[in-house]
Image: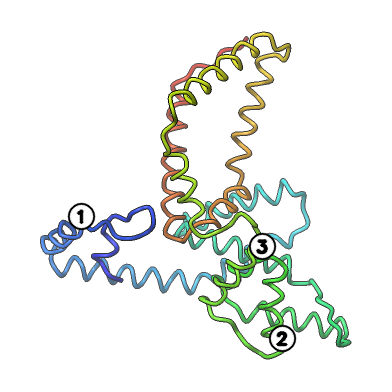
């Protein structure tokens, strides 16, 4: 672990904010080597513990998605398990990988991939199990984010030739064959850039006029206001469903995922405080 790099604030693209490097170096000097060594040792031990416990966590997630239950029950339990893994000590980005890899492995475990060459179902099943067991959490997570073409490329590279593809190559295959067709490197950054473009005065007036017309039409709407409010709340709750958030996080690097999850955690606290200050009124 590079303590200077770890402590230095990051830019949106993940690079170091050079303005803070001298401050971080001064901070390290003031702390002393004993303090830095203690933190480094803690980081080393927690990383090793996370690595050792990762297999058990993956096994539990896989068994969760293998249980027979309603979809809403499975989602509810998966959400609880995600929170539990973070409470145990797994990093948020690691939990995202574990959940994705475990779900993928459970869904693919009994799937048979027939080919031109005749093979019995037992042979196909053994090949599938062997293939899935050869890859670790990070690799399975990358494969889960590929479409069928990308997954087949990785699977047959092992089944036909015994090749285990490296993490770097898996990332390249996933980028070329994403399960989510909108998933592209830099997509999030370009979206932010587009949102920052200034509006012309005419466009700004047009938007304000449209908003005003929408407000006027809402007054004449026969739909009860409480139903409209319920719809708005349901749409908000849908946006924070675990599956939806997983798709969102999959578009970013692990470092960016940690930042997003941190902001969401802060938002939850602020939302809870806001709701607590409001008095419920029955109409």
First-in-chain label (1 vs 3): 1
Residue topped by disc 1:
19
The picture places residue 74, in percent across and down from the top left corner, at 70, 51
Residue drawn at (48%, 74%) of the image: 52
Q: Which one is in front, 124 or 157?
A: 157
- The mark found on residue 43 in the picture is none
- Contact (CB < 8 A) between labels 3 and 2? no
Mark 1 and mark 3: Cα distance apart in space: 42 Å
Q: Give the mark toward the camera: 1 or 2.
A: 1
Q: Secondary structure at mark 2?
A: helix
Residue drawn at (65%, 12%) of the image: 217
Q: Secondary structure at mark 1?
A: helix
First-in-chain label (3 vs 2): 3
The picture places residue 106, in percent across and down from the top left corner, at 70, 66
Residue topped by disc 3:
103
User: What is the quadrant of residue 11 in the picture?
Assistant: bottom left
Q: Is residue 136 above or below residue 281?
A: below
Scheme of image coloration: rainbow
Q: Give the mark toward the camera: 1 or 3.
A: 1
The picture places residue 139, in percent across and down from the top left corner, at 57, 73
- Contact (CB < 8 A) between labels 1 and 2? no
Residue topped by disc 2:
159
Counting other residues with Cα less than 10 Å from the Cα at mark 3, is it few (<14), some (14-19), or many (20 or more)? many
Q: Secondary structure at mark 3?
A: helix
Counting other residues with Cα less than 10 Å from the Cα at mark 1, is it few (<14), some (14-19), or many (20 or more)? few
First-in-chain label (1 vs 2): 1
Q: Is residue 222 above or below residue 276?
A: above
The picture places residue 47, in percent across and down from the top left corner, at 40, 70
Mark 3 and mark 2: Cα distance apart in space: 22 Å
């Amino acid at each position: 672990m590079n303590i200077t790099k770890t402590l230095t604030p990051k830019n949106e693209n993940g690079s170091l904010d050079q303005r803070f490097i001298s401050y971080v170096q001064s901070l390290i000097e003031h702390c002393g080597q004993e303090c830095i060594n203690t933190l480094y040792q803690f980081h080393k031990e927690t990383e090793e513990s996370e690595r050792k416990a990762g297999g058990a966590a993956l096994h539990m997630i896989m068994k969760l998605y293998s249980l027979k239950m309603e979809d809403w029950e499975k989602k509810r339990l998966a959400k609880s398990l995600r929170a539990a893994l973070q409470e145990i000590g797994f990093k948020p980005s690691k939990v995202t990988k574990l959940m994705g890899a475990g779900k993928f492995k459970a869904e693919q475990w009994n799937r048979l991939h027939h080919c031109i060459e005749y093979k019995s179902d037992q042979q196909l099943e053994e090949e599938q199990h062997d293939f899935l067991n050869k890859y670790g959490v990070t690799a399975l997570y990358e494969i889960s984010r590929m479409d069928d073409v990308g997954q087949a490329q990785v699977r047959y590279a092992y089944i036909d030739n015994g090749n285990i593809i490296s993490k770097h190559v898996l990332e390249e295959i996933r980028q070329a064959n994403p399960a989510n067709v909108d998933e592209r490197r830099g997509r999030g950054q370009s979206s932010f850039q587009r949102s920052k473009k200034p509006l012309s005065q005419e466009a700004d007036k047009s938007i304000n006029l449209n908003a005003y017309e929408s407000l006027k039409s809402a007054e004449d709407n026969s739909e009860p206001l409480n139903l409209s409010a319920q719809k708005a709340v349901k749409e908000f709750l849908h946006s924070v469903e675990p599956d939806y958030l997983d798709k969102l996080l999959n578009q970013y690097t692990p470092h960016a995922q940690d930042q997003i999850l941190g902001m969401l955690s802060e938002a939850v606290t602020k939302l809870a405080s806001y709701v607590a200050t409001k008095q419920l009124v029955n109409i």
